[in-house]
Amino acid sequence: MDPQDLPKDPHRPYEDVMAMLVGTLFVALGVTFYTQALLLTGSTAGLAFLLQYATGWRFGVWFFLINVPFYWLAIRRMGWSFTLRTFAAIGLVSLFSELTGQWVVIDELQPLYAALMGGCLIGLGMLILFRHRASLGGVNILVLFLQDRYGWRAGYVQLGIDAAIMLAALLVLPPERVGLSVLGAVALNLIIALNHKPGRYMGVS
């Protein structure tokens, strides 16, 4: 039987709320690992990490501010429901990333473990959000808009932006930390690629 022919089992509102909380808490814990180990990832979160290390302003502040210009693109491409969920997810990640550092005290963190486990945590959090029609906004929405408007391949544009972020990170981080960040980004994207496939998860919101 084609998975698309199976009956849909919509998420209930309380399930969406729980998923939003759990997903953003996972992402915030991954952010805490990365901040502690002086690492970064790609996309909008990568820009927030880069600006945090360059200016001293906290990740949560930068992450929230960077995403503001992208909301109108989200409304145009994804509609109000997706945009409001994304706004809530971004706000929660910004808040929880500030609070997690107070809730969790890490005396020592091995950088390779931080890169891989932090990437997995962020990837799992994003996966949960995707399955409940939310995202972490920003660059992901931009590349989809550029693909629709100008025909630019979203994957290539995303790769170019992430590569530029990693290259810029060499100005503020040691090369070995940038290398570990690339490993973390691979772990994050593998989590998404292996688990977020059409027809594999039938829940809808």
Image: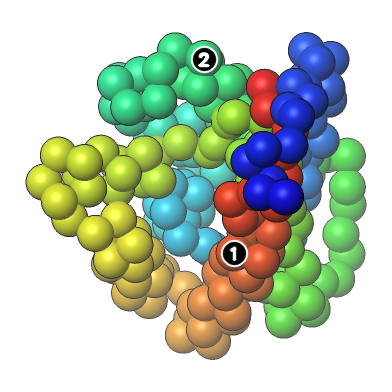
Q: What element carries label 2?
A: helix
Q: Say which amino acid is labelled 2.
A: Ser
In the image, is 88 to the left or to the right of 30?
left
Badge 2 is on which residue? Answer: 81
Q: Which residue is drawn at 67% across and 22% down?
A: 205
Q: In this view, does 47 lie to the left or right of 104?
A: left
Residue visible at 80% across and 16% down in the picture: 12
Can you give x and y, in whole percent of width and height, for residue 171 in the image? 34, 72
Query: Label 1 crowding class (10 Å Cα cut-off): few <14, some 14-19, many 20+?
Result: few
Q: In the depicted view, which residue is nearer to us: 32 or 76? A: 76
Disc 2 and disc 1 in contact, CB within 8 angstroms: no
Q: Residue 127 carries which label?
A: none
Q: Tell me if 135 is positioned left or right of 204 in this view.
A: left
Residue 27 in the image: above or below residue 183? above
Residue 179 appears in the rendering: yes
Please tell me in which quadrant of the rendered image residue 139 appears.
top left
Q: Position of residue 16 (x, y in %)?
A: 75, 22
In the rendered image, which quarter is residue 86 located in? top right
Q: Residue at x 88, y 47 (%)?
A: 104
The image position of residue 164, as x and y in percent, is: 29, 67
Q: Residue 193 got which mark?
A: 1
Up the image or down, 116 lies above or below 55; here it is below
